[in-house]
Image (cartoon, grey):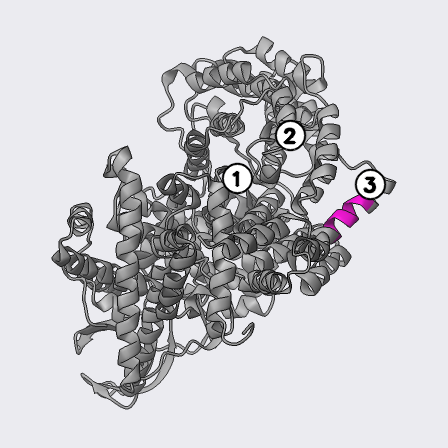
Amino acid sequence: MGRKAENGPTEGRDVTGLLRAWSGGDRNALDELTALVYEELHRLARRYLRSERPDHSLQTTALVNEAYLRLVDYTRLEVLDRAHFFAVSAQAMRRILVDHARRRNAKRGRGQQRVSLDDVAVVADARSTDIVALDDALRELTVRDPRKARVVEMRYFGGLTVDEVASVLGVSPVTVMRDWRMAKAWLYRELTPSQHA
Amino acid sequence: MPDRWARVEHVLQSALDSPPRERDVFVREACASDLSLEYEVRSLLASYEQAGRFLERPAAESIAENLADEQRLVTEDRRQSLVGAVISHYRVVGRLGSGGMGVVYKAEDERLQRFVALKFVSDELSREPDAVNRFRREAQMASALNHQNICTIYDIGEHESHPFIVMEYLEGVSLKERISEGRLPRHTAISIANDVLNALDAAHEAGIVHRDVKPANIFVTRQGRAKILDFGIAGGGAATPVREGAAAKAATSATRLGTLAYMAPEQVRGDAVDRRADLWAFGIVLHEMLTGRRPVLEAGAAAVMPGPLGQVIARCLEPDRDRRYHHAADIRADLARVARRANRYNWVEWSLATAALALVAVGLVLSRTWSASDAGGSAVASTNRPPATLARSVTERSVNAAARDAYQQGRYYWFSGGDSERTQAYFKKAIELEPDFAAAWAGLADTYIVQDQHPSDTSPGGQAALKAVALDGSLPEARVALAAVYFYGNWDWGRANAELQRALQLNPNLAEAHHLYGYVLAALNRGEESLAEQRRSIELDPFARPWALGRALLTSRRFNDAVTELRLRDDARPGNKTTMRDLARAYWHAGLDREWAEERAREFRATQDEASAEAVQRAFARGGRQAAAEWLLRAEEARGRTTYVPAWRLAYATARLREKESTLAHLEDAYREHAQALVFLQVDPIFDFLHGDERYRSLVRRVGLPAR
């Protein structure tokens, strides 16, 4: 683990401002955001390590929600701003997380010890999802059906709830769920080699 | 969007909307003879069915978990390399184990020629200066405790910037391992209990609270002596109050899960703790030693094993710590008394009772109702009760003791969600002894209202509620009972609301008032406010109605959050049927099918219905959740042929299969039956698929719910 978190929790920094700068075209803002997100990921990882339970499914949802909350304090935003920032933060998260996965894949390729996924690799779980491949498939999906791709981006990368996604897209939550299930079916098929080819 | 895609989507979505048994035919017909369309739809349907939890957990989560896995491997390597190393004057000879805080080695002290245990702080904690400081400080504190029942701390040190503790080397097993093999013989349990109490007594006298007493932290040596480990160390990790503020609250309670089962109510709430928190934990441990399982914590009280030992445990488990034992030594004395008496009576009574493990109430059971009328002490969060409510405590103080006891028993059963006949029997007895006992009338009303076919001014529940109000109009519990009549019976939201506001004026900290108000708000589709009320109700009373917040999340369509919340509550207090049922619903809507099926099976097992549990699991294995839901419907229908099954339940069973016509028909029947659950007709996500239907909308109007 490279980065340490001696510089303390991130809540003091203005993630909102960085997102605003990034969506306004400031490329450096993304680097700063990346640093913050990495810090948060490592903080999360440490929390997982500390927990004794082999099955993290319980704690993690809460932890991840907390992480998103710490990164982007939506409550501080004006109502009109909120929808916009949900979308922007999901985009930023996607960029950062995919980049992160790509770098780690490259590192492994250089002969680093491969992570053991033992029991988790067998289940069709987000955990064993190849994020880089998913990103590619998502681009494909954007061509076919941009709204569904955005739903996935906001839910999976942005950690938004169905209601939040609905408010960003200006559609009903039912529509979001319908988009989600179709996108899920399609993406799952894309990422499952040769089964339906 | 290409036409082709739109066509695929149209057929796919309609197929997913239609009952599974009709899907095959539907797809074939919808695709006419367009084979490539049919192929595409079928392949997506298959993919959807296999996808499971794919993408259901946010990306950040999986990445962080992978990081944690990698780190674990690296740490593992480093740890292994320590064996054989000489650290200071300790030669590491082997690894003893690891836990959340770090890893423990066996080492030889080369100077004193004895074995010691070296405990290293885990890698990730050693990076946090706060944690390291806490580790050191608490090691110092614990080293001040020199007691035969406390694992001795010899030294602290640091190796390659990893702090470690040098401790007494013990041979034996942890109490957790012992209990996992089954309950302990009585004399063994009492002997261990005595050792633990001696240790706690010594520590408490030195001003140190352990904060994490649990079987895993109690070591039983080969000689059979118990020693408490991690004094003040483990507690620092698990019980440190939240730093990150409100947002972190849920996460913190989740990370506390491991030991939540042993935490006193004040500790769960995050209040400052004192020695009495350790005594609560001790009570749980004692129960677990004697019976092999932890007591069921219900409604601010514990349902513990019967008998004289059970009474000791019950006093350890008083939700109000003022009523708990204050000193470990007092428990020790009571245990000695019980043991002496037991020797005389040969334990017949005790062993019979343990064998049956009947869940009975022992000791004084406090309910919030009672606490509100008892100026001296209170069960939950009533310290800041306004003086206004103290006035009426005078009337109730004059109630005779036997009536009061019966009332408390009744409240206990009521909050346990258990035997309604027994609950009513107690309230009736209280009323018999004290005909003007308003609180007992309110209690009786609560139990009647859930049974009333149609609660109203003239139904038994309504009558009892009116009587309670007539006897004491300033009794908030009476107002809540009346509100329940208006809400479930009259579907009169306005009057229900007025009564609840009144109750909350009389006692702003009355958990059940917040709870019912939360339901009213949920029914009226005011999700956010409803969440706030349920959150408040569960804060005020973490043990009663553990499903409250989870259900509010469910009706607010926050399914994943509902799963997290309900699992937390279910873990902390397993066995509550409503929690189980709501958890199953949350799984269903979150798309966690396997978990849903397992939860349904667990629900059957809770009522000793093994055959149904297996059948639902078989159906699930065969054809996923649709097949399991079909089985559940058939089971309800079969039951309906021999006994009365409420239409509401049938509506639920058909709604799972999205069978529109039959669901609407059952709902109409439910309306004719005046099913109380219809108040949630509009917000229950299971009926979402009906929202476009005019017949459904008409039903919503007739119940008087505002259109969405």
Residue B660 relative to residue B259: left or right: right
Determine the residue positioned at 53% across, 69% down.
B178
> Tag 3 or tag 1, which sits nearer the N-term?
1
Q: Quadrant of residue B196?
A: bottom left
- Residue B211 vertical position relative to residue B645 in the rendered view, above or below: below
In the image, is residue B518 part of the stretch drawn in magenta?
no
Residue B475 relative to residue A9: left or right: right
As drawn, the residue found furthest toward the top would be B470
The image shows residue B59 at horizontal and vertical percentages of 37, 61
Q: CA distance from mark 1 to mark 3?
A: 27 Å
Q: Nearer the viewer, mark 2 or mark 1?
A: 2
What chain does mark 3 sit on?
Answer: B
**Crowding near the residue tagged with mark 1, few <14, some 14–19, many ≥20 C-alpha atoms within 10 Å:** many
Viewer-proximal residue, B249 or B668? B668
Query: Label for residue B404?
Result: none
Tag 2 secondary structure = helix
The image shows residue B528 at horizontal and vertical percentages of 42, 32
What are the residue bounds of the magenta stretch? B631-637
Viewer-proximal residue, B621 or B372? B621
> Tag 3 or tag 2, which sits nearer the N-term?
3
- Please say whether residue B402 is visible from this viewpoint: no
Query: Label for residue B640?
Result: 3
The residue wearing badge 1 is B551
- Residue B305 vertical position relative to residue A32 in the rendered view, above or below: above
- Residue B262 vertical position relative to residue B647 in the rendered view, above or below: below
